[in-house]
C-alpha cells in the first residue's frame, strides 16, 4: 500500500455532502455566546473562591510571619489602646517565644465549661502568646504566676495543691527551669524583687496532690515568709514572719513590706530585723497592695481594703471581689510623717508608672488608667477587649489576674492597636485547614461545573 | 465579544464551515457526529476568536481546534463505550469486491486509534505535509512519521490483500 494508493482509496470514500441541520449556525452562535459568558462567570467565581480561601487561610493561620521581633531588647515598649483577649489559635510562648512581655493576664470564660488561657502581651504591643505551662489540675489557668519586673520571665507554682518545684519560664527563649523545693509545700507567690534575682513567697507544709481551694486560705492564715533566690534556687525562710498574706519589695530590694494579719511589717532582709509599720492616723481594715505597694522612690506605700469575708484569714479586696472596692490609699513609707496624696477611687492597682503616678485597672469597664498623685489627673491609656470567642463563641470572654512588668511602665508608650500577632496556629489546625481548603476548592469546582452545565443546557434553543 | 469581532467571526464561519465539516466527517466517519464536532470547535473558536484572528494563518488554527476536539472526545470513556465500531467483514468474493471495498476501508479506519486515524486523515485525505500534520496534532514531525507508519501497518493487517485484489479488479 503506497502513499498514492492510500490517498486514492481515501478520496474514493468521499460522499455527496448532506445539507446542514436547520439553523445550525444560529444554534452554534447561541451556544458560543453562552459558553463565553459561562467562561467569564467561571473565571470570576474561581477568582473569588481563591481570594476567599486565601482570606480564610490568612485568618486561620495568623502570625506565620514573625511579628517584627516581638519584645526585642532596646525596642520601644508599646501598650496598645485595645488589648486583645482569648483566641484559641494563640501559640504557646514556650514553643514560639515573642520576647519581653509587658503584661500577663488570664482571659476566658468559666460559665459552662472553662475556655480560658493565660496570655502574655509583649512589648511590641501586638504579639500575644499563651502560657501553656499555666495549665493546672482543674483547667488551663490553675497555676499561679508572677511576671518579672523586666518582663523576661514568669515564675509559676501550683495554686490548688502542693508544689514540688517552681517553674521559671524564660519568655525570650521559651526555655523553662525547675527550682525544686526541699519538700512539697503549699506556696503563695507574692512579689518579685526589683533586681529580678529573688521572689518573696509564703509556704506551709502541704503534701496533698488533690486540688483544693482550702490551700489559699490556709496560706493566708499560716504561710511562712520565704525568699527564693533565683540564681541558686535556694529558699530562705523567716519563721517569725507568719502568716505572710502579702508582700512588696522596697525600691532597693533590701526591704520588704509584709502583711501579717491586720498589721504591716517592714522586714530588713540583710539582717532579718523587722518593725511594725504604723498608719497615722490609724485606719482599720487597710493593708498593703499585694506585690506593688511600694513606690519606686520609696516614699509611699499603697494600701487597699483587707477583709476576712467570714473566713479565718484576711484577704485583699480587689474589684475582682466586688465593684465597690478599688480605693487606693497612700501613706508615707519612710515614717517621716509627710503628707500623703489623697486616696483615689481608681480600681485595682497594677503598678507605679512614675514615683507620682499609678497604673490601675477598672474591672467594670476594662480600662487601664494612669492616676497622677500630684495633680489628680486621670488618663485612660488602654482597655481590654471582651471578644465573643469563649465557650464555643457563646460567651464574652473576661479577664483577670492582670500583671504588668513594673520596670517597663516608665518608658511605655501608648499606640493604636494593631492586628494581634498570635504566632503560628497549632499543627493539627494547619493540617485540618489545608484539608478543608482542598475540599472546599473541590466542592466549589464541582458546583461551578454543575452550574455552568446548567447554563449550557438552558442555552440550547 | 465585540460586535465587529463577532461579524468577522460569522463571516469566517460561513465561508469555511463546509470544509470544516468535511474534515470532521473524515475524522469521525459520521455526518451527525461531524456536525457536533464542528459545532464544538466553532464554540471554542468564538471564545478564542481574538487570539485566532491574530494568528499568522487562521485555517490551521481552526483545524487544530477541530482535531483537538475530536481527539479530546475520543479520550472520554463514554465515547469509547458508546461509539459503534463496524466489524471488518471477511474478504469478499472477487465479483462483489468493489461494492464492499469502501465499507471495509471505513471499518478499518474506525478500528485505528484516534491519533492514528487523525494522522491518516490529515496526511492522505486532507493532503497536509508532515509539518502541517504535526502542527495540527500538536506533536513533533517524528511522532507524525512514526504514527503514520503504525497506522499503515495496522491498515495492512486489517485489510490483507485489499490493495492487490482491488488493483486486480481494476
Image: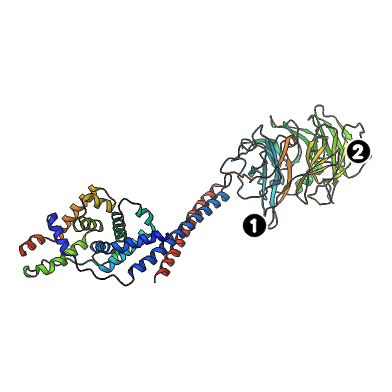
**Sequence-earlier tag: 1 or 2:** 2
Distance from disc 1 to disc 2, alpha carbons, whole Å, reads 49 Å
Vertical position of residue A454 compared to residue A52: above or below: below
Q: From this viewpoint, is residue A54 visible?
A: yes
The quadrant in which the C terminus of chain B is found is: bottom left
User: Residue A218 appears at what percent x and percent y?
Assistant: 79, 45
Are both tags, 1 and 2, on one chain? yes
Q: Please identify the quarter of the rendering in which residue B8 is found.
A: bottom left
Check if mark 1's residue and mark 2's residue have beta carbons within 8 Å.
Answer: no
**Left or right: A434 in relation to A246:** left
Q: Secondary structure at mark 1?
A: loop
Q: Please identify the quarter of the rendering in which residue A299 is found.
A: top right
Q: What residue is at 21 percent from the left and 54 percent from the top? A: B128
Q: What residue is at 66 percent from the left and 44 percent from the top? A: A134
Vertical position of residue A204 compared to residue B127: above or below: above
Q: Which label is found at residue A279? A: 2
Kindly identify which chain the residue marked by label 2 belongs to: A
**Left or right: A296 in relation to A115:** right
* Residue holding disc 1: A393
Q: What residue is at 92 percent from the left and 36 percent from the top? A: A339
Q: Secondary structure at mark 2?
A: loop
The quadrant in which the N terminus of chain B is found is: bottom left
Residue lying at the far top in this picture: please name it. A271
Amino acid at each position: 500500500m503506497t502513499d498514492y494508493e492510500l490517498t486514492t482509496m481515501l478520496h474514493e470514500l468521499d460522499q455527496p455532502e448532506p445539507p446542514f441541520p436547520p439553523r445550525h449556525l444560529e444554534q452554534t452562535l447561541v451556544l458560543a455566546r453562552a459558553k463565553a459568558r459561562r467562561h467569564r462567570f467561571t473565571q470570576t467565581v474561581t477568582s473569588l473562591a481563591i481570594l476567599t480561601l486565601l482570606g480564610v487561610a490568612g485568618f486561620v493561620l495568623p502570625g506565620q510571619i514573625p511579628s517584627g521581633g516581638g519584645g526585642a531588647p532596646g525596642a520601644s515598649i508599646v501598650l496598645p489602646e485595645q488589648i486583645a483577649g482569648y483566641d484559641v489559635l494563640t501559640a504557646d510562648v514556650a514553643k514560639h517565644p515573642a520576647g519581653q512581655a509587658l503584661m500577663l493576664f488570664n482571659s476566658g470564660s468559666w460559665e459552662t465549661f472553662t475556655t480560658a488561657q493565660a496570655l502574655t502581651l509583649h512589648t511590641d504591643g501586638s504579639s500575644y502568646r499563651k502560657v501553656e505551662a499555666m495549665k493546672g489540675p482543674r483547667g488551663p489557668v490553675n497555676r499561679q504566676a508572677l511576671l518579672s519586673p523586666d518582663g523576661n520571665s514568669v515564675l509559676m507554682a501550683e495554686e490548688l495543691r502542693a508544689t514540688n518545684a517552681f517553674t521559671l519560664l524564660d519568655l525570650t527563649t521559651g526555655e523553662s527551669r525547675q527550682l525544686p523545693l526541699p519538700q512539697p509545700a503549699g506556696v503563695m507567690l507574692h512579689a518579685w524583687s526589683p533586681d529580678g534575682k529573688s521572689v518573696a513567697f509564703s509556704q506551709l507544709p502541704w503534701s496533698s496532690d488533690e486540688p483544693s481551694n482550702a490551700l489559699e486560705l490556709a496560706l493566708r492564715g499560716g504561710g511562712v515568709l520565704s525568699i527564693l533566690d533565683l540564681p541558686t534556687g535556694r529558699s530562705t525562710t523567716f519563721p517569725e514572719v507568719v502568716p505572710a498574706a502579702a508582700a512588696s519589695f522596697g525600691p532597693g530590694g533590701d526591704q520588704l513590706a509584709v502583711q501579717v494579719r491586720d498589721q504591716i511589717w517592714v522586714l530588713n532582709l540583710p539582717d532579718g530585723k523587722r518593725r511594725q509599720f504604723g498608719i497615722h492616723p490609724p485606719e482599720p481594715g487597710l493593708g498593703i497592695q499585694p506585690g506593688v505597694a511600694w513606690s519606686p522612690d520609696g516614699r509611699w506605700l499603697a494600701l487597699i481594703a483587707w477583709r476576712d469575708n467570714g473566713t479565718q484569714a484576711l484577704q485583699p479586696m480587689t474589684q475582682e471581689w466586688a465593684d465597690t472596692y478599688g480605693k487606693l490609699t497612700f501613706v508615707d513609707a519612710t515614717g517621716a510623717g509627710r503628707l500623703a496624696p489623697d486616696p483615689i477611687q481608681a480600681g485595682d492597682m497594677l503598678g507605679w508608672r512614675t514615683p507620682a503616678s499609678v497604673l490601675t485597672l477598672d474591672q467594670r469597664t476594662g480600662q487601664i488608667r494612669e492616676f497622677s498623685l500630684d495633680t489628680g489627673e486621670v488618663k485612660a491609656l488602654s482597655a481590654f477587649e471582651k471578644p465573643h470567642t469563649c465557650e464555643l463563641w457563646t460567651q464574652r470572654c473576661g479577664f483577670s489576674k492582670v500583671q504588668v512588668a513594673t520596670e517597663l511602665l516608665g518608658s511605655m508608650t501608648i499606640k493604636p492597636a494593631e492586628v494581634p500577632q498570635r504566632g503560628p496556629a497549632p499543627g493539627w489546625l494547619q493540617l485540618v485547614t489545608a484539608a478543608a481548603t482542598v475540599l472546599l476548592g473541590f466542592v466549589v469546582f464541582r458546583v461551578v461545573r454543575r452550574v455552568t452545565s446548567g447554563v449550557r443546557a438552558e442555552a440550547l434553543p | 465579544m465585540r460586535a465587529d469581532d463577532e461579524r468577522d467571526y460569522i463571516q469566517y464561519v460561513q465561508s469555511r464551515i463546509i470544509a470544516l465539516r468535511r474534515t470532521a466527517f473524515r475524522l469521525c466517519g459520521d455526518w451527525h457526529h461531524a456536525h457536533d464536532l464542528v459545532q464544538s470547535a466553532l464554540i471554542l473558536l468564538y471564545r478564542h476568536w481574538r487570539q485566532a484572528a491574530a494568528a499568522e494563518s487562521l485555517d490551521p488554527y481552526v483545524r487544530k481546534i477541530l482535531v483537538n476536539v475530536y481527539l479530546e472526545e475520543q479520550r472520554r470513556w463514554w465515547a469509547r463505550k458508546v461509539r459503534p465500531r463496524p466489524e471488518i467483514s471477511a474478504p469478499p468474493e472477487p465479483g462483489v469486491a468493489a461494492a464492499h471495498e469502501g465499507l471495509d476501508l471505513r471499518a478499518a479506519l474506525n478500528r485505528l486509534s484516534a491519533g492514528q486515524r487523525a494522522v491518516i486523515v490529515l496526511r492522505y485525505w486532507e493532503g497536509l505535509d508532515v509539518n502541517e500534520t504535526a502542527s495540527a496534532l500538536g506533536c513533533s514531525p517524528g511522532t507524525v512519521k512514526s504514527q503514520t507508519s503504525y497506522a499503515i501497518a495496522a491498515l495492512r493487517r486489517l485489510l490483507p490483500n485489499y490493495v492487490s485484489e482491488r488493483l486486480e479488479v481494476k
